[in-house]
Amino acid sequence: MPFSDSSHRIYQTTDHNEAASTSHHLWPHLDAWNASCNYLPHSIQMKAKIAVILDECVDNGVDRGWALAHKHNESPMEIQIKSHIKECVMSQIYEYFSFEEGEV
C-alpha cells in the first residue's frame, strides 16, 4: 500500500500494520479521526455485485438516451434514438468500470 510523508516521498508496503505505525508517526493528528471511523474488520471481504451494477448502468443509460433523443425532437428517427441510447449506456458503464488499453 503506497503512502507518503510530509516531504511527499512515496513508500510502498504490503504490511498494513507497518503502514499504520508509520502513519501514526507521520500524521499523529489522524489518530483521533481513525479511532472515530467504523472500519470493517480485516476478516470481512467485500465483493461488488457486478451484474447488478451493470444492469443499473444499462437501465440508466437507456432512460437517459431515450430522453436525450427526444429532448429537442418530438419524433426522432430510429437511428438517432439508438445512437443516443448506445452513447448513454456506454457513458454509464465507463462511469463505474475501467478497462485496460485494447479491451474496448
Image (cartoon, rainbow, N blue to C red):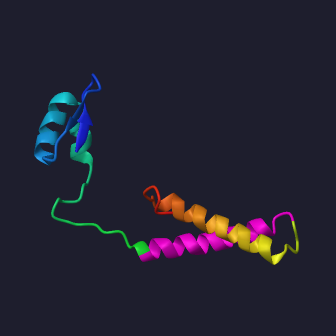
Quarter of the figure with the N terminus: top left
Q: Residue furthest front?
A: 102
Where 30 falls versus 53 (above or below)? above
Quadrant position of residue 32: top left
Spot occupied by residue 35 in the image (x, y as percentages of width and height): 21, 45
The magenta stretch is 51-72
Give me the residue at 29% from left, 26% from top.
8
Using the image as rendered, state which of residue 32 and residue 56 is in the foreground.
Answer: 56
* Magenta span main SS: helix
Residue 92: image location, x then y, percent: 57, 64
Total count of labels: 0
- Residue 24 horizontal/vertical position (percent): 16, 34
Residue furthest to the top in view is 7
- Residue visible at 85% across and 72% down? 76
31 lies left or right of 80: left
Q: Position of residue 37 (x, y in %)?
A: 27, 49
The answer to whether 66 appears left or right of 26 in the picture is: right
**Residue situated in front as seen by the camera: 13 or 53:** 13
Q: Is residue 72 above or below residue 7?
A: below
Relative to 10, is 41 above or below? below
Q: Residue 62 colored magenta?
A: yes
Is-magenta flag for residue 52?
yes
Residue 51 sits in quarter: bottom left
The quadrant holding residue 81 is bottom right
At a point 22% along the width and 30% down the height, the residue shown is 27
Viewer-proximal residue among 82 and 68: 82
**72 and 43: which one is in front?**
72
Picture residue at 31% right of the left edge, 69% below the top: 47
